[in-house]
Amino acid sequence: MIRQVINRALMSGRPQDYVIVYVDRDPQAGQRLAELNASRIAAVSEWALTLDDGDTVIPLHRVVEVRGPNGEAWRRGLKS
């Protein structure tokens, strides 16, 4: 489901209008929620997002929310 939501955002023609919220695990800062603009996504695989830096990979199970341009959101375990 999350892969389909992200692909829809990317195919919308305006990925810059979508925000991905995910669990970031930083060795220094610990675990926190982080946001990234969908326009930074270079590829979506069966299990992960690869960002435009070519190095950063975010597993799909760490994505907790996708926010759209009109305030609509997909949340893990909830739809609104």
Image (tube, grey):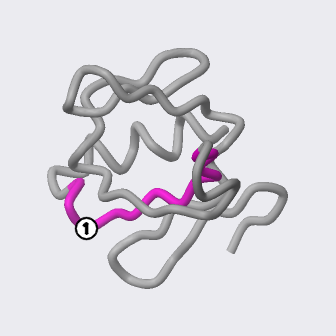
Residue 43, above or below 33: above
Residue 35 falls in image quadrant: bottom left
Residue range of the region highlighted in magenta in the rendering = 15-26
78 within the magenta span: no
Instruction: Report the residue marked by disc 1.
Output: 17
Residue 47, above or below 17: above
Specify the quadrant that holds the N terminus.
top right
- Residue at the far bottom in the pictured view: 71
| 20 left or right of 25 in image | left
Residue 23, above or below 7: below
Q: Give the residue drawn at x 58%, y 51%.
A: 28
- Residue at the far left in the pictured view: 13
| 56 left or right of 3 in image | left
Q: Give the residue drawn at x 25%, y 67%.
A: 17
Specify the quadrant that holds the C terminus.
bottom right
| 1 left or right of 41 in image | right
The prevailing secondary structure element of the residues shown in magenta is strand
Where's residue 65, x and y in %? 60, 61
Where's residue 10, x and y in %? 29, 43
Q: Nearer the viewer, residue 12 or 51?
A: 51
19 within the magenta span: yes
Q: Give the residue drawn at x 31%, y 51%.
A: 38
Q: Amino acid at mark 1?
A: Asp
**Element type where label 1 sits in the image:** helix
Residue 52 falls in image quadrant: top left
Q: Give the residue drawn at x 17%, y 58%.
A: 14
| 52 left or right of 50 in image | left
Q: Nearer the viewer, residue 29 or 10?
A: 29
